[in-house]
Amino acid sequence: MPTCETLRTVQLVPITAFDRDLQLSLPPIRRHAKRMAEAGIRVFIPCAGSAEFHSLAADEIRLTLEAYRESIGDESSIMAPTGHSVSVALDLLRVAAEATANYGLVMPLNFPYLSDEGARDYFRQLLDESPIPLLIYKKGPVPSNELLLELAEHDNLVGVKYAVNDLDEFRQVVLADGGRVEWICGSAERYAPFFMLAGATGYTSGAGNICPRLTLAMHKAISDHDWDEAMDLQSIILPIEHYRARDGSSFNISMLKYAITHLGLDFGSPRPPQRTLTTEEMEEIDQLLPAIIAAEEQLE
């Protein structure tokens, strides 16, 4: 199976904009998409985890995917999330294909009583019937590395977004795979240098919503094995990631939705059950962002 070189980069999860009534707001989404493309982002994962996938209806996902394709053109790739039951997941993949998404991302399984045996049937049906190539998002023990290696034989699986931060296990599964699929760090900038040293070819990013050029420069430095530069750039980005990781990563979305106001965009509040920031928490973000935005502007 040929590798997907387009995936070997920063894969941005762009946050989703809502109005004051928490309804989908497409104008800021389009503005943000164009800005990110102009900064050099070439792989977008709209409506995924940091974009409030679990609170979005199928029609909202369709409208958002269409807005991204209209805004970024055909030069960039769109990866559309899918999940829930098999029937819902396949419906979402058909929606994604109609919206000209290039890939589908099977989100972490959120069912009770998981096993590799049941997950195998779930993934195989999606892989067999999906109209677009798929990546699988691993964020827990199921699917196991052994199951992922088995599924890598399928022609419709092109990659794995790996977000279990055990670097030794990750290294072993990458070596065992032997290059059949792309292995992507799903733990963003905090872990990206270490995952890429262990064999990842790219990583997903939420911080890139605020500083796309910084994270693209970091990816390039890692790819060039310029580790001093890579770690210097990471140190600039890390305040965003450390803030998002607080309290069980429950600031993941709300931090970014507030931070983007510093760029002149209003993405509204997150939908429940995501947390709402206090005044004190907003003030903390106000203090950490100027240095990051200044460093980003130096790369324009």
Image: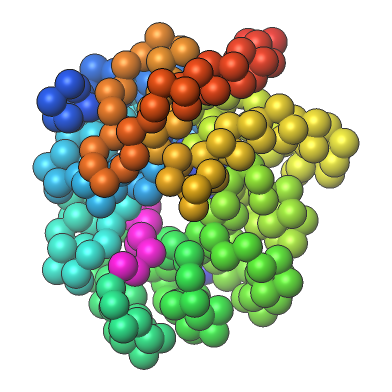
Q: Would you say 7 lies left or right of 135 here?
A: right
* Image location of residue 208, percent across then percent down: 53, 31
The answer, for residue 252, to whether it is visible in the render is yes
Against 48, is 122 above or below? below
Q: Quadrant of the C terminus?
A: top right
Q: Which residues are magenta?
A: 103-110
The total number of labels drawn is 0
* Image location of residue 115, percent across then percent down: 38, 86
Residue beneath the point at 14% across and 68% down? 87
Considering depth in this image, is 1 or 295 the residue closer to the camera? 295
Considering depth in this image, is 8 or 185 the residue closer to the camera? 185
State yes or no: residue 238 in magenta: no
Against 9, is 28 above or below? above
Q: How is the image coloured?
A: rainbow
State yes or no: residue 109 in magenta: yes
* Image location of residue 266, percent across then percent down: 32, 16
Considering depth in this image, is 197 or 294 the residue closer to the camera? 294
Q: Would you say 266 lies left or right of 286 here?
A: left
Against 21, is 14 above or below? below
Q: Would you say 95 lies left or right of 5 here?
A: left
Residue beneath the point at 19% across and 55% down? 92
Residue 240 appears in which quarter of the rendering?
A: top right
Against 135, is 79 above or below? above
* Image location of residue 67, percent across then percent down: 25, 28
Considering depth in this image, is 193 or 35 the residue closer to the camera? 193
Residue beneath the point at 38% across and 64% down? 108
Residue 253 appears in which quarter of the rendering?
A: top left
View extreme (bottom): residue: 117
Residue 289 appears in which quarter of the rendering?
A: top right
Residue beneath the point at 45% across and 77% down? 143
